[in-house]
């Protein structure tokens, strides 16, 4: 079944659920125990359809990345004396990429001289530019904050100037001197926190020339890095890791605190309008799937659900006209937790320092037929304008 067919099926199911509620509520406005059981089954099917649509969207995005050519086309004329000339050097060259893949396949027993020119401070070998580019593309597919945030490549500590005072205005008579207070600026510093992730490969696959080691490692490392990054970009405390959106200090501002144990329709509206108008233009919601299960049941004053399922492949569902994204790392509904973020996430800046590297993990899998590899990167992230994102907090 195609994505469009699933979208149509989900839309029909959603309409059927609304019709069921409208025709099966009793005089008290609630469902009987038997009808509630039937409605719960429909809800389960709705969630399953949504999960499958999201999975197929992710698969389509990854397929698009994987279908890109992994080598440069031949552009020189046949029989040219420059047939074997390569203009690219260092990490950009095919020779460097081939040397790294050979080193990986031989468990770093065969190290070419070309690799020795690109070693990081920890002894890892820098990732070839082509593979690093594919890693970044997959990180943006797997990591919702990389998709919505702003990425910056840095070579050292990166300072971002932000206004510490608001713009001023004054009415003046003709010919009078115009005076304003001096504008003040504060600085946000993007550091470089080291993130290491490991994957393992059986020796049989490693030495099998038919096994696509390059794509396997690229996909495995990208997923592992993306998961760790997303968790830190949302929940990190800024100590040895990025400062997350939900951090108590330096994170997003609290827009609404609920009066009960779960968010209400009115509180979602209050959250939206707690965000200043300029930031609402490109705003979106981020929440956990378990929170969505609660929000999906909320209705407006006319009895219509505020949840708006997407009917177009590749587009997110919406609440009150704003797109909704999910992350397993957003806290679930529980007393005192911040459970929904709403705002313009382009103000979350991600600083990528230098180049990622690969190295061998010798100790962990020694003697059990597995070979471990480590990918390392240096990255930081901060919300440079906390007022650009508001969060909804469950009461203590």
Image (spheres, rainbow, N blue to C red):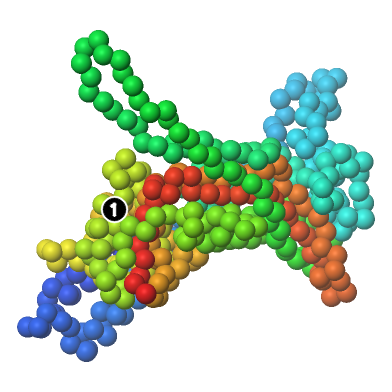
Closer to us: 49 or 229:
229
Residue at the spot x=65%, y=40% of the render? Answer: 157
Closer to us: 147 or 260:
260
Closer to us: 102 or 297:
297
Residue 33 placed where, x, y %?
Answer: 22, 89
According to the image, label 1 marks what residue? Answer: 274
Horizontal arrangement in the rendering, residue 385 relative to residue 322 (left or right): right
Residue 51 placed where, x, y %?
Answer: 42, 66
Q: Secondary structure at mark 1?
A: helix
Mark 1 nearby-residue class (10 Å; few <14, some 14–19, many ≥20):
many
Asked whether residue 371 appears in the rendered view, the answer is: yes
Horizontal arrangement in the rendering, residue 249 relative to residue 139 (left or right): left
Residue furthest top as drawn: 175
Residue at the spot x=84%, y=56% of the render? Answer: 105
Asked whether residue 3 appears in the rendered view, the answer is: no
User: Is 185 above or below relative to 27?
Assistant: above
Residue 313 placed where, x, y %?
Answer: 38, 52
Residue at the spot x=81%, y=28% of the render? Answer: 86
User: Is 323 above or below relative to 266?
Assistant: above
């Amino acid at each position: 079944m195609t994505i469009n067919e699933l979208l149509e099926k989900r839309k029909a199911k959603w309409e059927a659920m609304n019709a069921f509620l409208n025709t099966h509520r009793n005089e008290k406005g609630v469902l009987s125990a038997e009808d509630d059981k039937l409605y719960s089954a429909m809800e389960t099917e709705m969630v399953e359809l949504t999960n499958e649509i999201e999975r197929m969207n992710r698969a389509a995005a990854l397929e698009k990345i994987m279908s890109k050519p992994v080598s440069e086309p031949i552009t020189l004329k046949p029989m040219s004396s420059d047939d074997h000339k390569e203009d690219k050097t260092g990490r950009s060259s095919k020779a460097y990429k081939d040397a790294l893949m050979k080193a990986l396949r031989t468990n770093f027993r065969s190290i070419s001289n070309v690799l020795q020119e690109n070693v990081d401070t920890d002894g890892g070998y820098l990732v070839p530019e082509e593979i690093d580019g594919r890693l970044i593309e997959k990180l943006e597919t797997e990591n919702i904050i990389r998709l919505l945030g702003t990425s910056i490549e840095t070579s050292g500590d990166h300072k971002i100037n932000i206004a510490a005072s608001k713009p001023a205005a004054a009415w003046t008579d003709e010919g009078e001197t115009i005076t304003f207070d001096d504008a003040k600026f504060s600085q946000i510093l993007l550091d470089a926190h080291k993130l290491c992730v490991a994957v393992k490969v059986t020796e049989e696959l490693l030495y099998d020339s038919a096994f696509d080691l390059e794509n396997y490692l690229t996909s495995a490392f990208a997923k592992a890095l993306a998961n760790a990054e997303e968790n830190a970009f949302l929940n990190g405390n800024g100590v040895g890791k990025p400062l997350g959106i939900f951090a108590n200090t330096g994170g997003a501002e609290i827009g609404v605190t609920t009066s009960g144990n779960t968010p209400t329709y009115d509180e979602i509206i209050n959250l939206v309008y707690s965000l200043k108008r300029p930031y609402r233009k490109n705003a979106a919601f981020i929440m956990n799937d378990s929170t969505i299960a609660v929000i999906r049941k909320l209705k407006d004053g006319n009895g219509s659900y505020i949840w708006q399922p997407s009917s177009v492949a590749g587009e997110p569902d919406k609440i009150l006209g704003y797109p909704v994204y999910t992350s397993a790392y957003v806290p679930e509904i529980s007393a005192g937790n911040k459970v929904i973020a709403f705002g313009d996430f382009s103000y979350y800046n991600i600083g990528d320092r230098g180049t990622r590297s690969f190295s061998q993990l010798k100790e962990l899998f020694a003697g059990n037929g597995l070979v471990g590899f480590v990918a390392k990167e240096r990255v930081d992230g901060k919300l440079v304008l906390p007022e650009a994102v508001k969060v909804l907090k469950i009461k203590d």
